[in-house]
């Protein structure tokens, strides 16, 4: 992984964050970058507004380049998530943040490590091989979780992956919530105990409600809970595929 956040990427980031029509204003650029400069104890080329630079993009680029690579990474990542940027140019900012994290996450001092059970992950991947659409979504969720970003997207990928798996197993296009009534009979018809069937139904019901509450609100997602949701989704998927290999009695 690169140890530098190259100028070409900073140029691109500046064009998004300081977009002429939808980006930060000149005064916002100065106030936001100045706050980081105070924290890191550095001087900025453009510490006040109006600045000498011929454009907002140039001013933001110059100020960003004054930071160390790791600090620069953090500033860009956090600027992408500010309410002002999200409101004015959220789609482009989220795409920028995704690219930043995917290519340069080694510069993130706070990036999350993949702490979930590697045995569970490996086993789930193996069981999902006959279900490529679910496997792809599961892999995307693992990647995003490992990068330590996009918690809402991790939950969204996991939910959609489980939903697609059930659609394939049950031969329909129903939503996750509408699959719940059929789960119990699916398990008992394949020699699963009634107790397991009841527990499974209740767990998936609570799972769906949890997802509905949090999947639309990234800021509300509790970081420590994402690991649990990832592991329980893995267990759901693995057990469902395993049950599907049994003939219904």
Image (cartoon, rainbow, N blue to C red):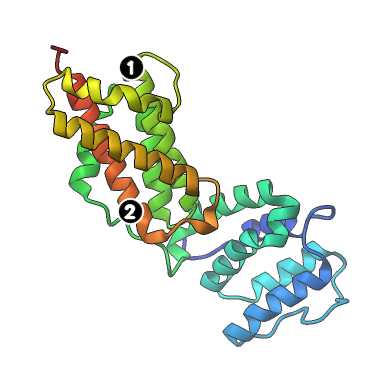
Residue found 42% across the figure and 25% down from its top:
178
Q: Position of residue 55 (x, y in %)?
A: 85, 64
Quarter of the figure that contains the N terminus: bottom left
Quarter of the figure that contains the C terminus: top left
Residue found 13% across the figure and 26% down from its top:
192
Residue that mark 1 sits on: 170
Does 240 appear above or below 53? above
Residue found 46% across the figure and 52% down from its top:
151
Does 30 appear above or below 19? below
Does 214 appear above or below 125? below
Residue found 33% across the figure and 24% down from its top:
181
Q: Position of residue 231 (x, y in %)?
A: 28, 46
Label 1 SS: helix
Quadrant housing residue 16: bottom right
Drawn side of residue 168 relative to residue 74, left or right: left
Task: Give the crowd class for mark 2: few <14, some 14-19, many >=20 residues within 10 Å.
Answer: many
Task: Give the crowd class for mark 1: few <14, some 14-19, many >=20 residues within 10 Å.
Answer: some
Q: Nearer the viewer, mark 2 or mark 1?
A: 1
- Mark closer to the chain start, 2 or 1: 1
Q: CA distance from mark 2 to mark 1?
A: 28 Å
Residue that mark 2 sits on: 227
């Amino acid at each position: 992984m690169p140890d530098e956040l190259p100028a070409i990427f900073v140029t691109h980031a500046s064009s998004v964050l300081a977009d002429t029509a939808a980006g930060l204003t000149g005064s916002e650029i100065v106030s936001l970058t100045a706050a980081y400069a105070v924290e890191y104890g550095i001087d900025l080329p453009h510490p006040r507004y109006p600045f000498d630079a011929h454009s907002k993009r140039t001013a933001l680029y110059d100020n960003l380049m004054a930071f160390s690579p790791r600090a620069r990474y953090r500033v860009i990542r956090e600027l992408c998530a500010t309410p002002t940027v999200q409101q004015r140019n959220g789609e482009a900012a989220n795409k920028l943040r995704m690219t930043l994290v995917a290519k340069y996450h080694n510069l993130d001092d706070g990036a999350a490590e993949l702490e979930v059970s590697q045995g569970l992950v490996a086993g789930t991947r193996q069981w999902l091989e006959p279900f490529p659409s679910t496997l792809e979504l599961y892999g995307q969720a693992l990647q995003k979780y490992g990068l330590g970003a996009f918690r809402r997207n991790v939950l969204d990928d996991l939910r959609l992956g489980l939903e697609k798996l059930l659609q394939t197993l049950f031969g329909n296009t129903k939503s996750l919530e509408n699959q719940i009534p059929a789960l119990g009979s699916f398990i008992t018809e394949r020699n699963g105990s009634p107790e397991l069937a009841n527990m499974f139904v209740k767990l998936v019901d609570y799972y769906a409600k949890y997802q509905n509450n949090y999947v639309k609100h990234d800021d509300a997602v509790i970081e420590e809970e994402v690991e649990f949701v990832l592991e329980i989704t893995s267990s759901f998927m693995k057990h469902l595929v395993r049950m599907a290999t049994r003939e219904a009695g």
